[in-house]
Image (cartoon, rainbow, N blue to C red):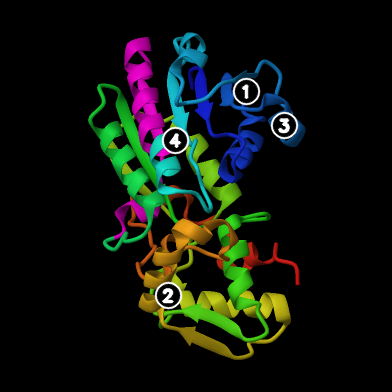
Amino acid sequence: MGPLFITGASGFVGRGLLRHLAGTGADVTVLTRSPDALQRTVPRAEGWRYLTGDITQPSTYAKPLAGADTVLHLAAVTGKAHSRDYARVIHEGTRRLVSACEDSGVSRFIFVSTIAAGFPDRRYYPYAEAKARAESVVRDSRTDWLIVRPTMVFGEGSPVLEGLAALAGAPVGLIPGAGSIMAQPIDRDDLAMILSSIVGQTPGREIIEVGGPDRLTVLDLMRKIRVELRGRPGPMVHLPLELMRRVLAMVEPALLQVLPLTAGQLASFANDGVAGRHPRTDPFQGPLKGVDTMLATLTP
């Protein structure tokens, strides 16, 4: 593995990746807007460099980027944000980073996207749209590339798991839609292990979907979450999914920051979130954590 340049390492997945790489001897440069804050969370390994910069401003990272063999790009706006912010950071930021990589002679580009970029129904989901547009930028680049699409990423502090737990763990469990959509969560540490392995592989200009070993309906997943939180299944009330999506989309421009969830986040209740098999990830399926193990991180 040659010199590695990582963006987005301060995020949920990025922090797990740094902890995994710390024991591998990898030569790592990390681009972050706040190196001190990141170091308080994940102390840098010997020889690592934490660089202050912003992917939307290539001048802040162009020089150290020139020494990298591989870029592992995780930086993104997540959670509740305006569509313009998703577009600026995820799409435009990726475009500028890819252009800088081409100018600097970086040989390999690995983009961590999301399974949602391939959802057939991405209505009201600017995060997924921005990821899909960023994927197009990567595919059109002159570098060798890989695009990795994880499914729901669970683990201690997982934002998506916390959101599902808020619905499933309510006095009466809430589930948007019928719950028949399939899910395939993956543990953050398992994803970090797979990404670390992929970094050392030969790029193939292909898209890789990555999920955990268990596939189950969203209804079964929400029931498991409820049992973990409350010790018993209890009642689950199905909410009208399409109506919720339309109403949330209408009020988000004015009420985004006070809403408990967004219309876009409900896309996971409208689209199957499962990963197709791939030779690069098949060897990992045996030791990956199952859903029950992942949910053990929840606290009532």
Residue 265 sits inside the magenta stretch:
no
User: How much space separates mark 3 and mark 1, taking CA atoms?
Assistant: 23 Å
Marks 2 and 1, the one that precedes in the sequence: 1
User: How much space separates mark 4 and mark 1, taking CA atoms?
Assistant: 30 Å
* Residue 36: x %, y % from top left: 73, 26
Of discs 2 and 1, which sits in the foreground? Answer: 2
User: In the image, is residue 270 above or below residue 67?
Assistant: below
For the stretch drawn in magenta, the main secondary structure is helix
- Circle 4 packing at 10 Å, graded few (<14), some (14-19), many (20+), is many
Residue 96 sits inside the magenta stretch:
yes
| Region in magenta | 90-119
Under circle 1, the secondary element is loop
Can you identify the residue that label 1 sits on? 25
Residue drawn at the location 44% of the way across and 35% of the way down: 89
Marks 3 and 1, the one that precedes in the sequence: 1
Residue furthest to the bottom in view is: 235
User: How much space separates mark 4 and mark 2, taking CA atoms?
Assistant: 27 Å
Marks 4 and 2, the one that precedes in the sequence: 4
- Circle 1 packing at 10 Å, graded few (<14), some (14-19), many (20+), is few
Quadrant occupied by the C terminus: bottom right
Identify the amino acid type marked 3: Ala
Under circle 2, the secondary element is helix
Identify the amino acid type marked 1: Gly
Closest to the observer: 177 or 44? Answer: 177
Identify the amino acid type marked 2: Met
Under circle 3, the secondary element is helix
Closest to the observer: 225 or 239? Answer: 239
Residue drawn at the location 60% of the way across and 56% of the way down: 159
Can you identify the residue that label 3 sits on? 37
Can you identify the residue that label 4 sits on? 89
